[in-house]
Image (tube, rainbow, N blue to C red):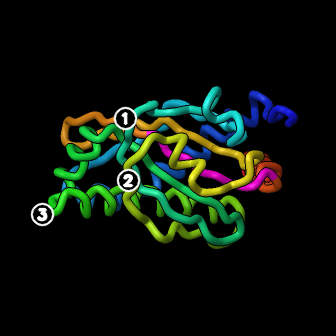
Amino acid sequence: MTPLKISTEQMIALHGFFAEAAAVGEEALGEITGCDTEVEVQEIRATPLSEFGDRGLCLSDDLVAGVMGRLEGRMPGTQSLVLEPEDALLWARLGGDDDPLDAFVALSRTLLEGMAQALGEILDGDEAFVGARLVEEPELAMLVRTHAPSDTIVFSTRLRIDARDEVLTAVSHLLVEPKYLAQVLSSLSAAHH
């Protein structure tokens, strides 16, 4: 497999895009938690699924709490958000729901829906995050269980979620077919110029 060819400028554009995409869900997250919520992208990496175990951006090698679902629209794929189990429970308590699992799924789904919406805007089409479900397993197992081909591109972003004086670290993953990489980079380049 040939390595991904993404220039420094393209990585900067991807970072900016994912930062804007994460910000789309902030207001909705604030409505759920009843407090201002800030989501900051700290790092981004694009890795073929076959190399994810060695070079991917991973929150932990251990069990994580995550929400995973499908991305439907102009660029189909899989989206997920993972946190350490303790952070997931803490974030869920901010959601105010009596059931922390439901609250965690609702908060994660809200953030991922915002990111999908932003992706649709950059691609000039509709994108939707659907089928949100709770997943508790190591990240690599979660991604491999999608049965995606080994050349699938995994866009991973390390996020800092700041709500009610709590700072949580999360990682989002977006899995797409390699043919969409050029489309995303081209769209970002056109939006930049």
Task: Report if residue 190 is visible in the image.
Answer: no
Do residues under tags 3 and 1 come within 8 Å of each other at their CB atoms?
no
Q: Amino acid at mark 2?
A: Glu
Horizontal relation, residue 99 to residue 85: left or right: left
Q: Nearer the viewer, residue 167 or 171?
A: 171
- The answer to which image quadrant residue 169 occupies is top left
Residue 179's spot in the image, x, y percent? 82, 55
Residue annotated with mark 1: 169
- Boundaries of the magenta span: 171-178
Horizontal relation, residue 108 to residue 5: left or right: left
Please tell me the numbered disc located at residue 123: none
Q: Amino acid at mark 1?
A: Thr
Magenta: main secondary structure? strand
Q: Amino acid at mark 3?
A: Asp
Q: Earlier in the sequence, mark 3 or mark 1?
A: 3
Q: Earlier in the sequence, mark 3 or mark 2?
A: 2
Residue 143's spot in the image, x, y percent? 57, 48
Residue annotated with mark 2: 26
Question: Which residue is drawn at the image coordinates 50% and 70% (left, top)?
Answer: 130
Task: Report if residue 112 is visible in the image.
Answer: yes
- Mark 3 vs mark 2, CA separation in Å: 22 Å
- The answer to which image quadrant residue 44 occupies is top right
Counting other residues with Cα less than 10 Å from the Cα at mark 1, is it few (<14), some (14-19), or many (20 or more)? some
Q: Earlier in the sequence, mark 1 or mark 2?
A: 2
Residue annotated with mark 3: 98
Question: Which residue is drawn at the image coordinates 67% and 59% (left, top)?
Answer: 122
Local SS, label 1: strand
- The answer to which image quadrant residue 5 occupies is top right
Outermost residue, left side: 98
Horizontal relation, residue 112 to residue 100: left or right: right
Local SS, label 3: loop
